[in-house]
Amino acid sequence: MAEGYKKIFWGIVIATFNITLGVIKVLPTFIGWIVVLTGLLELEKNNSGEAFSSSKKATKILAAMSFGGMFLSFLGNGNVESFLPLMFYPLFVVVIELVVFHKILAASVHHFSELNQHKTASIYISKDRMYLIIMGISLVFLVISLTFNQATMGIVGAILAILSRVYLLTIMSALGKEEHTAKDNAFI
Amino acid sequence: MAINSRIFKGVLLLVTILVIVGYSLVIYFRLDQPVFFDHYYDKRIYINEEQYQEISFNLSYITNVHDDRVVTQITFPEHPEVTIQASEYAYNAPFNWGSEKNKTPGDVYGRYSVRNVICKMIELPQKEDLNKIVLTHAKVLFDDASEITVDIGEINLYAYMPGEIPLEHVSTSGSSDGTGETRYRLLGNLTLTAIDSPLMANVKDSVQWEINNNIPNDSLGMTFQEGSFLDVTSRIGSMTGDIISEYTLFDIHPKLTFVDDAGIQYTQHFYNIDSLYHNYSFMTLYKYIKARGAI
């Protein structure tokens, strides 16, 4: 289990801070999402059922979108927003990201509950809530900024989105360190 | 987890609603074609002047923020003999290799961009018809070969011949709050016989001007004594608060005609009636476009 969360952690790191050498992106965003996907496959191995299937689907979409986004930025001269149907493209990426991580956290909480680790489960419930709230506010700022081409709101939205990613990193790193075996004496 | 699930669904629902509203607003705010401001300019052209004179004026327009077309040529269907060089780039280098070229000019305000076309006259019309030239429509050509014909307001050319007049210029002052004053000393008795300013009617909501503290038309027929002062004051600023008059661009040169005791006629123009610098914002531009009926 811990291995899976570690992979997800590094996947987010790559997706957030793309490594660029000169003009070539050594590790583009979609590679990051693929690493997240391998992490999810790892988690699934240790987990019976389809708990992580929706996150897996969403991560695949996310990887495809970032891959497509790379070509879009070549075509549109870096100005995707000028083409009306793609105006909210950056936002859709953030929404799918929200789906991926909320679903991962929900599955992890479910997993801890099954292991009778109710205390740990409740910690991650509140972390998930915090993540949802930061991302929700960030999304609202981003939609308004894209609609009115308002730079200040866009900056606030982007800062909140980065903050939520950093928060997510701390959550994933903590999840990697948790005990993932059954405990009989864990009660709230 | 039930609460989180509700927050999650709530966020998705809210974002979906905001995106739908956002798309509708973006489509609503979109301009079908650029909107040119109204321009009322008197353009002075020296005649009997061998020297080079640069006659230029600016035409401004509002367009969509991501409209990356640039005006390359402007012609006047009513007066094809008036040839101008039009450019949106302030420093028009013949070969623009720099990265500046990739950047579309203009000031961005939300979903709109205000652009400025610098028009320089390169061929002047024949001297004799100069005063008859009134430009109201322009055919604008963009760099993607699209073309539109727009109403630009009114640009009047007039021939100007520097001549003797028994008025001695004392002072001229202007302030950014829109007030200006020009003072002359009379070197002979002069009677004001005519005030010509065909463009003044178009900007009457934004311009107040006075001759010796009188409304100009009340001063008609008045005789100014030798040694006294002639004060022409102007106050610029929208009095009605109407957005169209507020955003009208003008530079008007009213012409005063005087007759002296010997019956000799003199003319004098005033140059202090010039529109103020505008502070645009997305909402005021929207109001302007709506008032113009463009959306």
Image: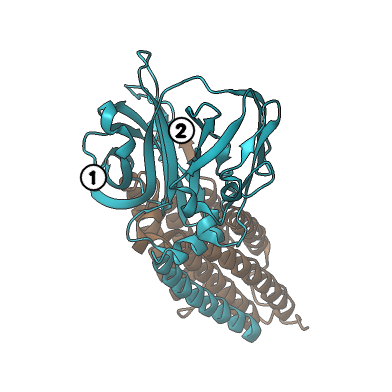
Chain colours: A brown, B cyan
- Quadrant in the rendering for residue B45: top left
Give the vertical position of A79 relative to A174 (above or below).
above
Give the vertical position of A31 relative to B159 (above or below).
below
Q: Residues within 10 Å of mark 1 (few under 14, many from 20)?
A: some
Tell if the residue under mark 2 belongs to the same chain as the one under mark 1: no
Q: Residues within 10 Å of mark 2 (few under 14, many from 20)?
A: few
Spatial separation of the CA atoms under disc 2 and disc 1: 58 Å
Name the foreground residue: B66 vs A62: B66
The answer to whether residue A28 shows anywhere in this view is no
What residue sits right under mark 1 in the picture? B78
- Quadrant in the rendering for residue B80: top left
Give the vertical position of A54 relative to A156 (above or below).
below
Name the foreground residue: B80 vs B48: B48
Residue at image x 37%, y 47%? A73
Q: Position of residue B118 (x, y in %)?
A: 40, 34
Q: Amino acid at mark 2?
A: Leu
Q: Position of residue B178 (x, y in %)?
A: 65, 44
Q: Amino acid at mark 1?
A: Glu
Q: Is disc 2 placed on a helix, strand or loop?
A: strand
What residue sits right under mark 2 in the picture? A21
Position of residue A33 in the picture relative to residue A105 (left or right): left
Residue at image x 36%, y 49%? B152
The answer to whether residue A168 shows anywhere in this view is yes
Q: Chain of mark 2?
A: A
Q: Chain of mark 1?
A: B
Position of residue A30 in the picture relative to residue A145 (left or right): left
- The image quadrant where one finds the C terminus of chain B is bottom left
Q: Residue furthest bottom?
A: B2
Name the foreground residue: A144 vs A11: A144
Tally the numbered discs.
2
